[in-house]
Amino acid sequence: MPTKRSTTPPDAIRVLKDDHAEVEQLFKRFEQLGPKASATKRKVADRVIEALSVHAGIEETVLYPAIRAQMPDAESDVLEALEEHHLVKSVLAELERTAPDDERFVPKMTVLMENVRHHVKEEERDLFKQMRASMSKGDLTDLGTALRGARKTAPKRPHPHASDTPPGNLVATAITAPLDAALAIGETAANAVRSRGRS
């Protein structure tokens, strides 16, 4: 007899924990790479940059405003999280511009991983517990749906100087998302040309 599958969409905490798990897998992959795996390190770092940019974007446009509106006692936690995001996005922007064979590439990635792991630990230990206590199951499910929907327009690259709170972050996202998409298309085309030139 087939098992019944839940048709309830994942709640906000599940959505965010899944993101955390995806990034942690990328970190572990990066840590396993040897000193001569520069090209693979670049690919993994680029996936980390995109995953963390999207994750920060959906938290800043959907999660944190909802928490500030429904959980005033968590205000200081949200402000601290926003500062941690700012630092991470600054390192991501530097990492994006750093060649994988540069002596600073791996140290930048190491610092990034330490900061993100600290942020995730606090978020999962403290903020998610507060959310479960303060929000209804329906609120958490609605928030999960909103987070998943926000992925469509979330930035794919770090923008550390863009506003991270409404309404400024909503305007910044509307501007940066199409630019990020155009840059990605341009980079893909340039890589294809380079590959043909090597053949």
Image (cartoon, rainbow, N blue to C red):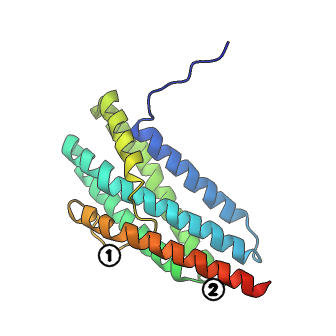
Say which of 180 and 35 sits in front. Answer: 180
* Mark 1 or mark 2: whose residue is earlier in sequence: 2
Q: Amino acid at mark 1?
A: His
In the image shown, does 60 or 132 lie closer to the viewer? 60
Residue at (34, 28) in percent of width and height: 137
The picture places residue 186, in percent across and down from the top left corner, at 53, 78
Vertically, is 5 above or below 56? above
Q: Secondary structure at mark 1?
A: loop
Per the rendering, the mark at residue 47 is none
Q: Is residue 91 visible?
A: no
Figure check: 159 above or below 67? below
Query: Is the N terminus in the top left, top right, bottom left or bottom right quadrant?
Result: top right
Residue drawn at x 48%, y 79% is 94
Spot occupied by residue 4 in the image (x, y as percentages of width and height): 57, 18
Q: Amino acid at mark 2?
A: Asp
Q: Position of residue 113 (x, y in %)?
A: 54, 64
Q: Residue at x 58, y 64 (%)?
A: 47
Residues at marks 1 and 2, CA–CA distance in whole angstroms = 25 Å
Quadrant holding the C terminus: bottom right
What crowding class fits label 1: few (fewer than 14 Cα within 10 Å), some (14-19), or many (20 or more)?
Answer: few
Say if residue 132 shows up in the picture: yes
| Labelled disc at residue 102 | 2
Out of 117 and 44, give the one closest to the viewer: 44
Label 2 CA crowd tier, 10 Å (few <14, some 14–19, many 20+): few
* SS type, badge 2: loop
The disc label shown at residue 161, or none? 1
